[in-house]
Image (cartoon, rainbow, N blue to C red):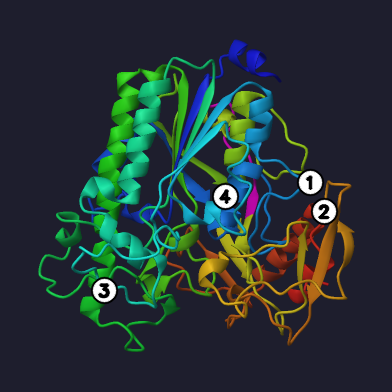
């Protein structure tokens, strides 16, 4: 379907996507959270459909963006990477269809090795510098007299931090202000547009100016702890005191409330130009962030519990009354929705289902299951009631990567020993499911050096009844019901044509 046909059938003209990074569902007022103030997110939710069973797909940051912009799960094939030569981001087809696309972001991973090529097919892109690992400055501002305690080795943020003198100078506020300005300058000018705002907050560092810095822990009198540790059992092991744990969580809350305030600037711009009448507005995230739930912090090598994987999704559709949706959905479904709105298709095999039938009340469900996980770790099968995390049967091998763009996580703050190993003489040409283009297949065996995120200790399989046990405290793995989920996962792998090594690694042969 072309864009004109889409408009004839009543599909809205435009789409705005706001992707906030590490946004915890259970902390938003719209989802019952009371710990931190999120008035503007709640203001948006009041006019949106709230999705109650929305989950991650590929994890973490860049794999999740691949889900949304390319529509295909990739954690079963590669750990982290850019748009491959045999696939296209949706923006390529939108450009061909005459849709104006604008990216506004402060997300460093989009512009590093392993994240390149996601931005290139946007009509235009705007990168607001200085967040987290962005190598923006080569020296700190000499007039800056101090910076918050970083709780980790030196980072590029240390040099950037002194250049943020006031709230409006921080990357998150600059990104949101730039988005609001773009709306003011472009609303009504283009026939159709996609505005994609990839805002890195409330991701760490949880660094904010006052009043946010002290808003949720006013009695703390030490340096702000803006970098959380990535580990399980930080309090139990004495890495964090209870007071330090509260301080980290409070700093996250301060950043959440700050970015909520600036999100309100975008809502104001949409109000000014009455875009609610012809624009679908999507608020989403890539994943949550552990802030002490089960004494887990950051995103360490543990199964994808609800805190990380059960994520918020709010969509305002013109002419659709606010409400809730209990259908099972996942990140690749956002891609399918964008493709449906604009009437385009991409050449690669995709895995999503459009959300439009759910939004319009034309369907109650679009899928019976979804997969989520991190490459080289557990594969999670989620249905309407259960979550099954399948761990390696023994050694975490063989591990397989399929790629034409041999890249890895951001290399400027990783050593060569931490990066993805290069292909060796075991590599050969294979095919991606649904594509005739050859790709490099590399298998790593037990004892080979692998990326650090796959080098984790596993705790066996996990199976939870989320209806009866939403806190995931009673592991049903080993019970008779696990046999059913094992067979379901095997059948899904066959349907998706995942590498045979995944069957071996997870004991599904």
Nearest the eye: 160 or 446: 160
Of the two numbered discs 1 and 4 in the rendering, the one whose residue sits closer to the viewer: 1
Distance (Cα) linking label 2 and label 1? 9 Å
Q: In which quarter of the image is the N terminus?
A: top right
Disc with the residue nearer the chain's start (2 vs 1): 1
Read off the residue under disc 3. Answer: 149
Q: Which of 250 and 490 is in front in this view?
A: 250
The verdict on residue 363 being magenta is: yes
Sequence-first disc among 4 and 3 = 4
Residue highlighted by disc 4: 65
Crowd band around label 4 with a 10 angstrom C-alpha radius: few (<14), some (14–19), many (20+) = many
| Residue at which label 1 appears | 86
Give whichever of discs 1 and 4 has the lower sequence position: 4
- Tell me if label 4 and label 3 are in contact, CB under 8 Å: no
Rounded to the nearest angstrom, the CA distance separating label 4 from label 3 is 30 Å
Residue drawn at (31%, 73%) of the image: 150
- Which of pointers 4 and 3 indicates the residue nearer the eye? 3
The stretch of residues the image draws in magenta is 360-370
Q: Is residue 16 magenta?
A: no
Tell me the residue that label 2 is attached to: 432
User: How far apart, in angstroms, are the residues tagged by discs 2 and 4?
Assistant: 19 Å
Residue at (10, 70) in percent of width and height: 219
Measured from the top left, where is residue 225 in percent x and y? Answer: 26, 72
Q: Which of marks 2 and 1 is in front?
A: 1
Asked whether residue 384 is in view, the answer is no
Tell which circle, 3 or 2, labels the residue nearer the N-terminal end: 3
Assign the C terminus to one quadrant of the image.
bottom right
Residue drawn 64% across the image and 65% down it: 408
Q: In which quarter of the image is residue 332?
A: top right
């Amino acid at each position: 379907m072309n864009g004109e046909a889409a408009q004839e059938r009543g599909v809205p003209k435009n789409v705005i996507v706001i992707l906030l990074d590490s946004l915890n569902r259970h902390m938003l007022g719209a989802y019952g959270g009371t710990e931190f103030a999120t008035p503007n997110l709640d203001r948006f939710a009041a006019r949106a459909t709230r999705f109650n069973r929305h989950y991650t797909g590929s994890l973490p940051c860049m794999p999740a963006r691949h889900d949304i912009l390319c529509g295909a799960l990739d954690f079963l094939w590669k750990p982290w990477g850019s748009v491959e030569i045999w696939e296209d981001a949706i923006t390529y087809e939108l450009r061909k269809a005459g849709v104006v696309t604008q990216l506004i972001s402060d997300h460093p991973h989009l512009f590093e090795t392993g994240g390149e090529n996601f931005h290139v097919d946007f009509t235009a892109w705007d990168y607001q510098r200085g967040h987290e690992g962005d190598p923006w400055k080569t020296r700190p501002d000499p007039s800056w007299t101090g910076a918050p305690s970083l709780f980790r080795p030196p980072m590029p943020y240390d040099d950037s931090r002194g250049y943020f003198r006031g709230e409006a100078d921080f990357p998150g506020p600059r990104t949101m202000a730039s988005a609001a300005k773009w709306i003011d300058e472009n609303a009504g000018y283009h026939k159709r547009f996609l505005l994609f705002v990839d805002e890195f907050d409330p991701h760490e560092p949880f660094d904010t100016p006052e009043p946010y810095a002290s808003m949720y822990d006013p009695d703390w009198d030490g340096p702000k702890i803006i970098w959380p540790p990535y580990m399980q059992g930080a309090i139990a092991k004495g890495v964090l005191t209870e007071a330090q744990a509260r301080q980290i969580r409070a700093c996250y809350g301060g950043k959440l409330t700050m970015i909520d305030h600036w999100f309100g600037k975008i809502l104001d711009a949409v109000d000014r130009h009455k875009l609610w009448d012809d624009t679908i507005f999507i608020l989403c995230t890539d994943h949550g962030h552990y802030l002490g739930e089960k004494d887990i912090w950051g995103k360490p090598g543990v199964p994808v519990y609800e805190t990380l994987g059960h994520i918020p999704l709010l969509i305002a559709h013109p002419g659709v009354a606010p409400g809730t949706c209990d259908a099972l959905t996942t990140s690749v479904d956002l891609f399918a929705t964008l493709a449906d709105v604009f009437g385009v298709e991409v050449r690669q095999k995709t895995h999503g289902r459009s959300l439009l039938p759910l939004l319009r009340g034309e369907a109650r469900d679009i899928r019976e299951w979804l997969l989520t996980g991190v490459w080289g770790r557990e594969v999670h099968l989620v249905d309407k009631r259960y979550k099954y995390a399948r761990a390696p049967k023994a050694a975490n091998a063989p591990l397989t990567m399929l790629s034409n763009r041999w890249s890895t996580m951001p290399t400027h703050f990783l050593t060569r020993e931490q990066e993805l190993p290069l292909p060796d003489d075991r590599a050969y040409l294979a095919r991606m499911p649904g594509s005739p283009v050859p790709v490099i297949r590399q298998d790593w065996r037990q004892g080979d050096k692998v990326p650090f995120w796959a080098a984790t200790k596993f705790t066996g399989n996990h199976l939870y009844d989320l209806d009866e046990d939403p806190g995931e405290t009673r592991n049903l793995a080993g019970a008779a019901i696990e046999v059913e989920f094992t067979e379901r996962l095997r059948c899904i792998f066959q349907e998706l044509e995942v590498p045979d090594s995944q069957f071996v690694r997870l004991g599904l042969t």
